[in-house]
Image (tube, helix red, strand yellow):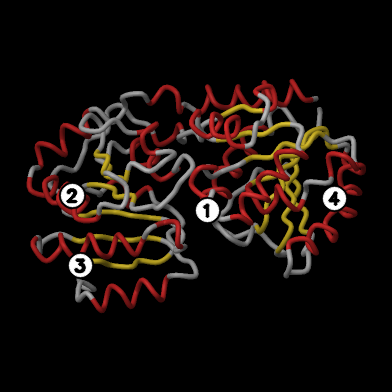
Amino acid sequence: MRSICFILYDLTIVGGVEKVVEGLANQLTDTYKVYLVSLHGDQANPSLHFDPSIEVKFLNLPTGRLRTQMTSAIRPLRKFFRKNHIKVAFSEATFCGFITAPLRFLSRTKVVFCDHGALANQLDDADITKMRKLATKCSNKVVVLTKRSEDDYKKIFNTKAKKLTYIYNWVDESLIDENRTYPVDSTTIVTAGRFTKEKGFDMMVQAASLVLPKHPDWHWDVYGEGPMLQEISEMVEKNGIGQQLRLKGFCSDMRAVYQNAAMYVLPSYREGVPLVLLEAKAYKIPCVSFDIVSGPREILEDGVNGILVKPYEIEEMATRISVLMDHPEMRQNLSDHAYTNLEQFRQSTIKQQWVDLIEELS
């Protein structure tokens, strides 16, 4: 059985990247010997559940400059690759892609840079763009999340087509239920994610302050933790909506939350392929999202199984949410069509794409 590994920045943190890797690594254990390497931390977050056959290695690198982390990571990673006969290593997200960039030339392992964001979203960030470019040039293959991102890599970085592929995140098959009943009487809006700038929780508070006072029987529950939690909490209190916009903290199992949600709102500034939208879609929840560069448009069709709002138009988002709140028949209709285009996000389809990639590189 051939060996592969996934390299993550810090397994003590749980975000979209970690959840995607959790699902993929677990599914590939029936075909490969799977290892995980965490550049930082000393134990995995307890909400991450990996197959017992997966071995996890923590490098506990020094923090600080990424170039220092790079030089500190190369030797232990090379040793790990040799010891475990790693055929393919997946370097997850930009920081890992940058830190592991030299490995392609210093080991026999094929290195794949997995970009979980969207290139066009962060072109104004010179440092991130440079790191992405180095990771791309130094990798054997680049995996992006959408066709739009693949096209951007070709256009902006002049990356050759044979070096690129796009593979969607999948929706957990256990969440899909064709017979699921939508709770049309629910009065709960849900948003979830890590409290970081790109997730747009500041815009969420602004939209909520326009909507909730007019709908006193509704609540907007927000799940997650992160560095902006205190700032967002202060915004909520300043806007006087703390009784309705409830910051619920980290939730290890969102299934019960989704089962009772009237709608899901994604207020992000940028995304790759947002896993939370796929999960909400699986639960037949009407979704409202900004029509940002990458992600939502490939999951939702405006007016069919979701609502797409012009990016960062907060008043328009508030209006569209308010209309759905006032018209349960519209929510029901969106729910009834939630599984439109779901096939391309099926686990079996996407797993096979990863297996094909590994076989190509092995």
For disc 1, the marked residue is 124
Secondary element at image label 1: loop
For mark 4, what is the residue?
Answer: 77
The answer to which of marks 3 and 4 sits earlier in the sequence is 4
Three-letter code for the amino acid on which mark 3 is drawn = Gln
Residue 191 vertical position relative to residue 303 in the rendered view, above or below: below
Q: CA distance from mark 3 to mark 2?
A: 15 Å
SS at mark 2?
A: helix
What's the residue at 39%, 31% (across, down)? 298
**Residue 239 image-quadrant placement:** bottom left
Secondary structure under tag 3 reads loop
Question: Dot 3 corresponds to which residue?
Answer: 244
Relative to residue 200, is residue 155 depicted above or below?
above
With 127 as the anchor, is 58 left or right in this view?
Answer: right
Q: Which residue is mark 2?
A: 321
Depth check, mark 2 against mark 1: the one in front is 1
